[in-house]
Image: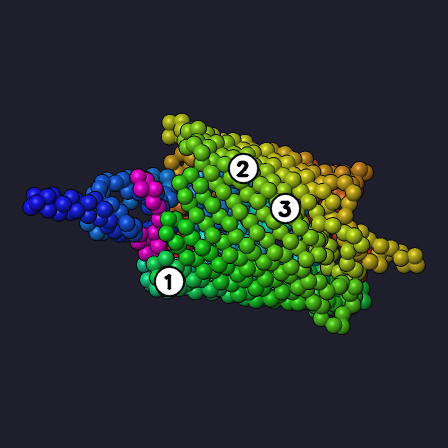
Amino acid sequence: MKNISLLFIWALGSFSGISAQYSLQGKIINQDIAENISVALPTLKKGVRTDSLGQFSFAGIPAGSYHLVITATGFEIKDTLIIINKNTSISILLQQLENKLEDVIIIASSRNNSRLEDLPTKVEVLGAEEVHEENQIKPGNIASLLGDIAGIQIQPTNAATGNADMRIQGLQGKYTQILRDGMPLFGGYSGSFGILQIPPLDLKQIELIKGPASTLYGGGAIAGMLNLVSKKPVLGKPEKSFTLNRSTLLENNLNAFFSNRNKTAGYTFFAGTTLQNAVDVDKDGFSDVARVNSFYAHPRFFFYPNASTTLTLGYTYNYEDRMGGDMRVIDKRADPSHRFFIGNINLRNSIDGILEKSLPNQSSITVKGNINFNKRAISTADFGMKANQTLWYSELAYASNRLHHKWVTGINFTGDRMIKSIPDSTLVPNETAATWGAFIQDDWKPIPTVTLQGGLRTDYHNKYGWFVLPRLSILYKPNNRITFRAGGGLGYKTPTLFSAELDERDYRIVAGYQQGIRAESSVGFNTDINYKLKLAEWSITINQGFFYSKIERPITPRYLYGIINSGPVAIFQTNENAPVTSQGLETYIAATHNKLELYIGYVYTDAKRDYYPAASRLPLIAKNKFATVIAYEFNDHWRAGIESAYTGTQYLSDGTATQPYYFGAMMIRFNQGKFSWVLNAENILDYRQNKNKSIALPPYSNPSFQEIWAPLDGRVINLSMMIKW
């Protein structure tokens, strides 16, 4: 009996040992990285992500030996064998990759912080280095930086105000969704100057999706989606920087950025001002560069109540006074023969918040929202208009990384309200719109070389009803040299009263929508093949892409003319009875050799408006564009670059063909300690549409202008200085 009792006690003890479970806690001790690193125990099918301090933990681990696998952007994969027989704490040091710039985290397009190379959807990223360099080349805004991307054309639309439209793959700017930290930024009455009001010093990176991207962000992303990612404070790395700039076009910029954080809180603060004098480059009496006085402030506050939670609160203040037209009017010397001007005063106040909570098993929940209060006052010689626009956005999203799947699902609510100030001299109606949406997306990796991404979005708009938007993409990566991507989906765009193509003087006769107007709908596809190779000391990347978009029921302004008055008396937005199509290809070769960088790109775009057979080419879209960049870093102090571009024939609204032209730019940068100086020259060949003939047409007291298809400002040289510590 005694032996039986001893045997029972031994068996019970053995069972208790087998069933005992322990915890594993760890910390990534690299100073360069900490947050959002993937840590997995593959044998147990468990995975987590590190918190803002680089910490992670597992519970309920049976005794035994396990492989701990850690994956971090820009660092070698760490595979460590650990033995668990008690509660364990470890510290991990990761080894940096030789070429970490190729490994980029994408925030907006994936919603789960995926690596660029792992996404089935092609995303182009302008990283910290490009944004930093642009801050000294064009500190006032990001328009020039975006224009350097293949397939993007920054198209001036108004000679007096300097307004510009960002066109992707041949489609107008109204078909691109612009986001700031994953939330809509501009729209409708307030959005005409969008990219001209965003300074680069405040940005960490810029993410761009070309083609339909409506699954996660809803209507308006027919041509693509642009996400501006703000900087965040880094633990133990405070930043202070100032930028001063002056150009030969009488532009002055002063920008400042500060950031810092500790374990529980942090902040970033940007403030900048631009003073641009009006300039009459061709001496015809009218400004070719508008007068601009602006101030921009963007403070953000970060709170880390615990290791798995981050709360971000932000505020944006943007004031801009923009005026162009007759130089005598701008100089306050108006008379009956000199009275033409267009003025815009914009005041924007925005509040936003983001709550991010990490959950067990590599899951997370995000709550975000913003509200924008915009006041815009338009003034001309004949009328004035004031209106207030309120835009709001809220979202709840859940993301989960499980084995071969990366899920994200959520709901959001978007609203837009525009109210005129009374009295005014316009026909513009007040407008209110709201959209409720739900979305789901899954990145499924059935085998190591293939990733399938499927997404579905359903929106309900209070005026235009239901929209169902499926999307499907595939990534095939047979080895480290070849990557193939293909994807397509549906999109929609609800009608808006205002667009970049409308002259502000015509706002007084914008009367609303044609009865029975419907939302535009689209289908689009994008594919590309990417090939990387090494030849001796050369690293070469070759990329070939193809794109196609078709927009049904495109909306255009319809002018109504009076019987007595020969001029237009009203403008109604209306659907056309035939589609807009844009198709083409993008090709580029990028190569590096030690400190030398080379880029050659070509874009072919065939964009048509089938509803206008007499002039079917979509206006002001170059069919052929070439671009080259050569940059060389001589040493730690000196860097230089030369950029050139060829813009082929474009077509005006009446079908008239324009002349091709060349564009060149040069840059020299010198670094010394905390200081950096940049001397930059744009349009060094001084090619101008207005070089031999004014684009202003009589009567000069209230002129009309030719369509802008080439630069108006000519050769521009600027010198900037940056201090950073």
Which residue is denoted by mark 3 in the rendering?
A: 468
SS class, disc 2? strand
Residue 29 appears in the picture as rendered = no
Residue 454 drawn at (x, y percent): 53, 40
Asked if the magenta segment contains residue 585, the reply would be: no
**Foreground: disc 3 or disc 2:** 3
Residue at screen point 53% across, 57% down: 395
Which residue is denoted by mark 2 in the rendering?
A: 473
Q: Nearer the viewer, residue 481 or 347?
A: 481
Which residue is denoted by mark 1 in the rendering?
A: 304
What colour-coding does the image apply? rainbow
Q: CA distance from mark 3 to mark 1?
A: 38 Å
SS class, disc 1? strand
Range of the magenta residues?
42-56
Q: Is residue 405 above or below residue 236?
A: above
**Type of the residue with mark 1:** Tyr
**For marks 3 and 2 on the same chain, the one whose residue lies earlier in the sequence:** 3
Residue situated furthest right in the rendering: 564
**Type of the residue with mark 3:** Val
